[in-house]
Amino acid sequence: MNPPGYPAEAFPLQGVRHDGLPAQPAGSTAIQFTTVNITTAPPSDHIIWSLCCFVYSNPFCLGLAALIYSIKARDRKVAGDPEGARHYGATARCLNIVSTILVVITTLISLITIITIAILTS
């Protein structure tokens, strides 16, 4: 809603209150600026998870590959390339997930097999 006498394209946004009266005394040329700081989370490199997968569960060398991608992600983050760091970090995360799932499935199958053999032989 525009005050009387002001067309829509000529409505001043600074220095006028909602009722059309000047907000500051005449002759004042103060300009207000708004600064918005957007902080994004730094990309994750999953280095600890990759180290655990490399040391404890390394099926098909997936833990080693995850560790290499984690180190690349950390290098990209230090170099100031957040997109590259996100890419390498996401690859490291996927490799860690696959490695962890393979180890869990292998462990469960081994336990079930050992328990089944123990029950059948006794």
Image (cartoon, grey):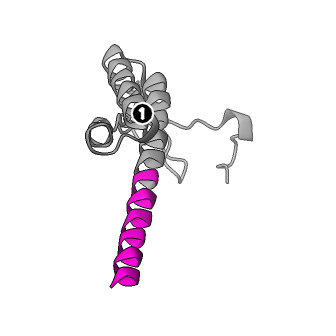
For the magenta stretch, what is the residue range? 102-122
Position of 41 relative to 104 (above/below): above
Of all residues, the one furthest to the front in this rendering is 121
Identify the residue shown where x is 68% and y is 48%: 4
Q: Nearer the viewer, residue 48 or 15?
A: 48
Identify the residue shown where x is 46% and y is 31%: 86
Image quarter in which the N terminus is found: bottom right
Would you name the residue on which mark 1 appears?
61
Position of 76 relative to 56 (above/below): above
> Disc 1 on helix, strand or loop?
helix
Q: Amino acid at mark 1?
A: Cys
Mark count: 1
Position of 100 relative to 54 (above/below): below
Q: Nearer the viewer, residue 72 or 17?
A: 72
Identify the residue shown where x is 42% and y is 26%: 85
- What x and y, as percent, mark residue 47? 29, 35
- What x and y, as percent, mark residue 6? 69, 40
Q: Residues within 10 Å of mark 1 (few under 14, many from 20)?
A: some
Q: Main secondary structure of the magenta part?
A: helix
Decide if residue 22 is in sight here. Answer: no
- Residue 88 lies in magenta, yes or no? no
Quarter of the image holding residue 12?
Answer: top right
- Residue 116 lies in magenta, yes or no? yes
Decide if residue 59 is in sight here. Answer: yes
Identify the residue shown where x is 53% and y is 52%: 18
Q: Nearer the viewer, residue 48 or 13?
A: 48
Quarter of the image holding residue 59?
Answer: top left
